[in-house]
Amino acid sequence: MKHYELEIAGLKRRLPIVQVSDEIALASFVILGDQELVAAAAPIILEKLPQVDYLMTAEAKGIPLVHELCRLLRHPYYVVARKSLKPYMEEAVMTEVVSITTQQKQHLYLNGSDAALIKGKRVALIDDVISTGESLNALERLATEAGAQVVARAAILAEGFAADRDDILFLEELPFFSVEGIE
Ligand SMILES: O=P(O)(O)OC[C@H]1O[C@H](OP(=O)(O)OP(=O)(O)O)[C@H](O)[C@@H]1O
């Protein structure tokens, strides 16, 4: 398997390059379990974030980053949009999303109590990676439907064309790879 050498927040990671569809190959960046990387990246992201009332992310890989950011900010709570409807949820708001890595339709649910919490508040949307931007768009639809004001969009990495966006904050770029190149 080929790898991509990523240097981020003073750390090095060797990312396996995986094929996710007939046309697309990408460097797999998984922060789940990587406490060291999350702890190193979060303070740098924090410096770039404006003042917000709440941080919001989507299950699953954005969660450890938002958790660490909130710990540093001393925010007692953050909002997680789940990928399935859970029994604890009431009056959930739902939207659909197809991300680059998962390549099939997923659902995102915002619990009604979370929607009420962020109504009229300044919210930052956080993810581990922004690629096509579909996951971010889905989060933004939920936040907007809840009446929140989205004031920042941030991730550790911007993949492919996302690195050209001027409406997102990120630490490093991640290139795309050709499927032929990994065979
Ligand atoms: O900009 P996009 O094309 O939407 O891609 C980025 C999203 O894709 C990945 O999540 P994935 O949907 O694979 O789910 P997971 O976090 O549950 O593993 C990643 O964690 C981002 O959330």
Image (tube, rainbow, N blue to C red):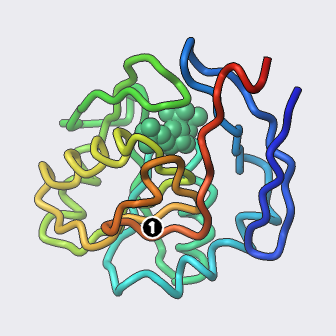
Viewer can see residue 59: no
Quadrant containing the N terminus is: top right
Identify the residue shown where x is 52% and y is 87%.
47
Identify the residue shown where x is 58% and y is 58%.
157
Residue 121 placement: quadrant: bottom left
* 42 vs 83: above or below: below
Quadrant containing the C terminus is: top right
- On the image, numbered disc 1 is attached to which residue? 77
Residue 153 placement: quadrant: bottom left
* 176 vs 63: above or below: above
Q: Residue furthest top?
A: 22
At label 1, counting other C-alpha atoms closer than 10 Å, the crowd grade (few under 14, some 14-19, many 20 or more) is some
Q: Position of residue 131 (x, y in %)?
A: 47, 44
Q: Position of residue 21 (x, y in %)?
A: 56, 16
User: In the drawing, does residue 65 fall left or right of residue 10?
Assistant: left
Q: Amino acid at mark 1?
A: Tyr
